[in-house]
């Protein structure tokens, strides 16, 4: 059973500012307060927030080395050089590759190929095998996306082979910047770009924006690629604020109206073609399917197999024929089904290990190692374990003679620093505050486990080990009017940096048809009513919260914390409460 949660009500905004915004915008004080909590204090700022404009995107040439990158690609296009687009095997990397490849193809450059490394034989980032493949294909320029910022030796190797490299990345750089023709990364210390939180695909978009700007190509030419950008933003969990909010807003519009053929095939498989696709739909339905291709091992004996699983994902997203795209989509969906079966099995095994080891349960972090687990799903398993045990978690396995794994964190704890503190034991590592990947020799595993656990023990605030639900405001069901819901929808897209508002309603009770649903009866669906308006019942769903079913079915009062979502069914749109947590009053 998941760890009990603490409810923390956010500090309310300045009452005067709230009153002014509520009056000037014609919205409720509850929603005006949400704006103030987000740092939006004037009507002008609110209008920009509610009406994102592509005109407010930053000049791409504010990014360090953008002029060099554009100049080099202009030369490559003019001289018909062969260009390789090289990216990571996850959603962010494959969407980035599809975007830049698709753009260069669209402007008529035919001497073009893309490369996604195999997770199992090459690992993350630029590989020697990938560079050697470029040499064989006569490539003179490699553009990396979502990787390369630490590939100092690999860039030098490419230069020795006569290949120029442009790096497009968004991860934290190391002490040395690779000696590439251009290094585009807003997180470079010497980069003055105003927004630091672009996705890898977002960096790719800024690059093609810069190319268009320099070459006099209309911006409308690249608007077609914004569906790829929003998929990357949602799947890579970057902040949905500032420039990302603009890109996501227009990306969702594109995804819902005229997505590329590959994304359309996934949308149909997910059953989303007749409803308004949201960030949540990308995170929980579209993204995992695209990711699954890169997670699954390629059958090397199959002559028709793609060079890597991630290669199939790019094929999907650059395909222009709808029928062929459907074939790629069906293949990727099969990969996702296989991935789900494997990660479910490994998660059950990991839970068993923890439950049968009291010493492990008592620690403030979780590190598990099993050389038989599949490399492609250890990150998912780490996330699943945090849902139950709520501790910084590392899951390790064996791949190509090395121990490799993924680490995930809890809010507030800097996982990257914890991993970095063990860097002398690691062959390589990378990531950010809440997620990291690492590789080490087998002989270092025991020492790593000890050192990592010790670091967490000494540095984590005990409060971080208790899951916290941040609540924006108390709300009566009678407040959830059609106008309130419409105004609330204007806050979308929701995500990190602009979380879906969470509300509390107190003293509510089962208003009808409380029942357990799901393959294993793991979810609770019900209608909820509040005393203040007994004739109003609102549909609610509590995922993975079946434990209070008997109590609730009996009609006894509960307090609920929830987000409000719009539930679409056969053209009917009705409000639904997505329950984050349930408490019995007084307990």
Image (cartoon, helix red, strand yellow):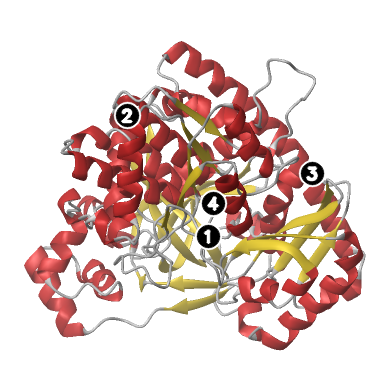
Disc on the earlier residue, 3 or 1 = 1
Q: Nearer the viewer, mark 4 or mark 2?
A: 4
The answer to whether residue 275 shows anywhere in this view is no
Q: Is residue 575 left or right of residue 43?
A: right
Image coordinates for residue 138, horizontal then vertical, percent: 54, 28
Mark 4 nearby-residue class (10 Å; few <14, some 14–19, many ≥20) = many
C-alpha gap between disc 4 and disc 2 = 42 Å
Residue on which the image places disc 3: 374
Numbered badge on residue 147:
4
Q: Nearer the viewer, mark 3 or mark 1?
A: 1
Image coordinates for residue 323, horizontal then vertical, percent: 47, 11
Label total for image: 4
Disc on the earlier residue, 2 or 3 = 3
Of helix, strand and loop, which one carries label 4? loop
Q: Quadrant of the N terminus?
A: bottom right
C-alpha gap between disc 3 and disc 1 = 31 Å
Q: Nearer the viewer, mark 2 or mark 1?
A: 1
Disc on the earlier residue, 3 or 4 = 4
Residue on which the image places disc 2: 571
Image coordinates for residue 434, horizontal then vertical, percent: 58, 66
Residue 83 falls in image quadrant: top left
View extreme (top): residue: 323
């Amino acid at each position: 059973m998941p760890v009990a949660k603490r409810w923390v009500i956010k500090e309310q905004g300045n009452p005067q500012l709230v009153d002014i915004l509520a009056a000037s915008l014609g919205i409720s004080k509850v929603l005006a307060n949400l704006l103030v909590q987000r740092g939006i204090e004037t009507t002008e700022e609110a209008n920009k927030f509610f009406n994102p404009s592509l005109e407010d995107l930053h000049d791409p040439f504010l990014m360090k080395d953008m002029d060099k990158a554009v100049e080099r690609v202009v030369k490559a296009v003019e001289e018909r050089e062969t260009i390789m687009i090289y990216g990571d095997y996850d959603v962010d990397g494959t969407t980035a590759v599809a975007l830049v490849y698709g753009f260069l193809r669209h402007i008529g450059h035919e001497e073009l190929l893309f490369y996604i490394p195999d997770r199992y034989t090459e690992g993350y980032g630029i590989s020697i095998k990938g560079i050697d493949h470029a040499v064989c294909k006569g490539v003179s320029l490699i553009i990396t996306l979502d990787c390369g910022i630490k590939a100092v030796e690999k860039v030098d190797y490419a230069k020795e082979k006569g290949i120029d490299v442009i790096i497009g990345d968004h991860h934290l750089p190391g002490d040395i910047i690779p000696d590439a023709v251009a290094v585009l990364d807003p997180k470079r210390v010497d980069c003055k770009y105003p927004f630091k939180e672009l996705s890898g695909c977002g960096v790719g978009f800024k690059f093609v924006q810069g190319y268009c700007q320099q070459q006099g190509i209309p911006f409308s030419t690249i608007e077609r690629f914004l569906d790829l950008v929003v998929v990357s933003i949602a799947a890579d969990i970057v902040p949905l604020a500032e420039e990302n909010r603009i890109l996501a807003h227009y990306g969702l519009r594109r995804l819902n109206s005229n997505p590329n053929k590959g994304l359309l095939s996934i949308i149909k498989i997910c059953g989303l073609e007749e409803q308004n696709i949201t960030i949540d739909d990308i995170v929980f339905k579209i993204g995992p399917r695209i990711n699954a291709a890169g997670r699954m091992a390629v059958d090397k004996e199959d002559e028709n197999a793609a060079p890597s699983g991630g290669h199939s994902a790019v094929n999907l997203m650059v395909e222009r024929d709808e029928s062929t795209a459907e074939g790629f989509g069906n293949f990727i969906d099969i990969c996702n089904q296989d991935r789900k079966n494997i990660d479910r099995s490994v998660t059950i095994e990991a839970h068993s290990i923890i439950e049968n080891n009291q010493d492990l349960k008592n620690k403030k972090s979780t590190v598990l190692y099993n050389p038989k687990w599949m490399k492609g799903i250890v990150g998912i398993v780490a996330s699943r374990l945090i849902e139950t045990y709520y501790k910084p978690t590392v899951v390790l396995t064996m791949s190509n003679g090395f121990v490799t794994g993924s680490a995930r964190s809890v809010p507030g704890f800097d996982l990257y620093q914890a991993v970095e503190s063990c860097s002398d034991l690691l062959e390589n590592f990378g990531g950010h505050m809440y997620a990291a990947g690492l590789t080490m020799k087998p002989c270092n595993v025991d020492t790593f486990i000890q050192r990592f656990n010790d670091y967490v023990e000494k540095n984590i605030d005990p409060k971080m080990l208790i899951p916290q639900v941040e609540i924006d405001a108390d709300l009566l069901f009678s407040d959830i009017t059609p106008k309130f819901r419409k105004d609330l929808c204007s806050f979308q897209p929701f995500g990190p940096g602009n979380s879906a508002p969470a509300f509390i309603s107190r003293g509510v009770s089962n208003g009808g048809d409380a029942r357990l649903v799901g393959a294993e009866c793991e979810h609770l669906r019900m209608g909820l009513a509040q005393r203040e308006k007994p004739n109003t019942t609102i549909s609610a769903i509590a995922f993975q919260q079946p434990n209070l079913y008997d109590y609730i079915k009996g009609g006894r009062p509960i307090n609920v914390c929830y987000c409000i979502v719009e539930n679409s069914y056969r053209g009917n749109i009705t409000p639904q409460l997505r329950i984050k947590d349930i408490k019995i009053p007084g307990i």
